[in-house]
Image: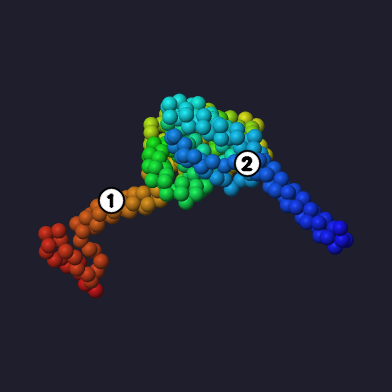
Amino acid sequence: MPPSVQRFAARTCAALLAIAAVSRSREALAQTAPVTSTTPAQTGATAGTSNQPAQPPSREAEARTLFEQGVAALADERYSDALTAFARSYEIRRVASVALNLGISLRALGRLTEARARFTEFIEMASPAQHERHDREVANYLADVNRRIARIHVERVEPEQARVLVDGRRVSLDERDELAVDPGEHTVEAQLNGYTGTPQRVSLEPGGRTDVRLILTAVQPDPRVTITPPPPVRQPGPSSPPRPITSSPWLWVGVGAAVVAAIAIPTAIVLSNQEATLPGTFCLRTDGSRCATGGL
């Protein structure tokens, strides 16, 4: 065989071997790639994709198995079992379909504040197809839970640095100093090192609202805590005893004037009854006649 033919045959064999190797590599990759299914669930939301990094095949399969268990429990109205299965699936893979089914399970169990959070997450994560299919349903769920959620209004916390706890869990109040809670009984309290207070027990109907005041008493005041006392209330002082009338100078002026008048009036009457005896003057008698006293 000529050398040129041998070289051509060798090149042809090498090319065929390379094509076969590429084909085998593609087959291996196809077998290990995770499988995503969009099969509609029997109840609640359909399975969807996630923006999270792809899970290993074993974890992906576990999340899907748990999701299917939750769907079956939800269809049988076994809401606690459904919640457990969906919650475990959601820990592995946070997708819109699981969020919606979690919200449905929580709403059925009366855990309204958590249900509202899951419905909101569905709205944030849903694909356009999921929005088109479930948005009206989710809007009805949200309207229902918002109507039934109760609220606690904390009118006052003293000292202001104290922490507010509801059912033993620290909470943050909204801009109206309120907290959304599920209907039922709750324990509300304030805590601060060096202070003590009495927890308050409240009972709320669906959609109800109550006001509480949380006042703590210092046991060992924290020097870093400054409490501004309320302004003192001015109390009326004891009434002064009335001054004796004899202490008034005007009284004695009046008395003196009265005494002078009492003396002057009789004197004037007596003098008027006497005729003038000065020479060269005249006088008037008491009967009005004129008398002469002589002249110079």
Look at the numbered disc 2 and give the secondary structure of its residue. loop
Where is residue 146? Give x, y as percent: 41, 41
Task: Give the total of numbered labels.
Answer: 2
Label 1: few (<14), some (14–19) or many (≥20) C-alpha neighbours in 10 Å: few
Look at the numbered disc 1 and give the secondary structure of its residue. helix
Image quadrant holding the N terminus, namely bottom right
- Which residue: 38% across, 33% down? 206
Q: CA distance from mark 1 to mark 2?
A: 129 Å
| Residue that sits furthest to the right in the current view | 3
Residue 262 shows which numbered tag? 1
- Which residue: 15% across, 65% down? 291
Where is residue 283? Give x, y as percent: 19, 65
Towards the viewer: 132 or 57: 57
In this view of the protein, can residue 244 be seen by the observer?
no
Q: Is residue 127 above or below residue 69?
A: below
- Which residue: 36% across, 49% down? 251
Kindly identify which residue carries mark 2.
Answer: 34
Q: Amino acid at mark 2?
A: Pro
Image quadrant holding the C terminus, namely bottom left
Towards the viewer: 114 or 206: 114
- Which residue: 55% across, 31% down? 66
Where is residue 24? Give x, y as percent: 71, 45
Q: Amino acid at mark 1?
A: Ala
Q: Is residue 197 above or below residue 26?
A: above
Towards the viewer: 77 or 26: 26
